[in-house]
Amino acid sequence: MALFRSLKSGLLLGMVLALPLSGCVVTPAPYYVGATVRVGPPAPIVETVGVAPYPGYVWLGGYWNWNGERHVWMPGHWEAPRRGYYWVPHRWVPAGGGWRLAPGHWEHRR
């Protein structure tokens, strides 16, 4: 009986402590979409692409991101394909005397 009470109070305590985190949202590293960066990105890094973890997976190549101070390489990764869509890679485009990151995205095939 004492063990049951201990487990019950531990569970209750865990729920109470987790309550403030229930509205917590985890977001990926920010992209500098919309912000112009004065420093152009370095040349892309040549990545070694291994074997896909599952048949049909798509390789999403790495790209240079901006962390607010400098460009940082974001390595590529395998991802499950999306039926009826194709991957448009991240790219830096000239904008307003600097550069702006256009994030990669899945685009619907027409």
Image: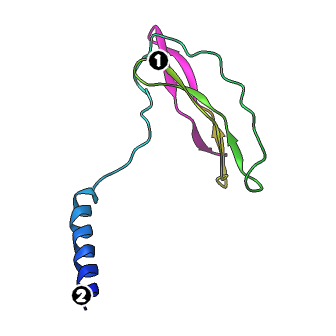
Outermost front residue:
2
Density class for disc 2 (Cα within 10 Å; few <14, some 14-19, many ≥20) is few
Label 1 residue SS? loop
Q: Three-letter amino acid code at disc 2?
A: Ala
Which of the two residues, 6 or 51, is positioned nearer the viewer here? 6
Horizontal and vertical percent position of residue 101 = 50, 25
* Overall secondary structure of the magenta section: strand
The label number, if any, that marks residue 81 in the structure image: none
Identify residue for label 2. 2
Horizontal and vertical percent position of residue 95 = 48, 14
Q: Residue at x 46, y 7 (%)?
A: 97
Q: Locate residue 96 relative to residue 54 in the image: left or right.
A: left
Horizontal and vertical percent position of residue 20 = 22, 58
Which of the two residues, 89 or 76, is positioned nearer the viewer here? 76
> Which quarter of the figure has residue 21?
bottom left
Name the colouring of the figure: rainbow
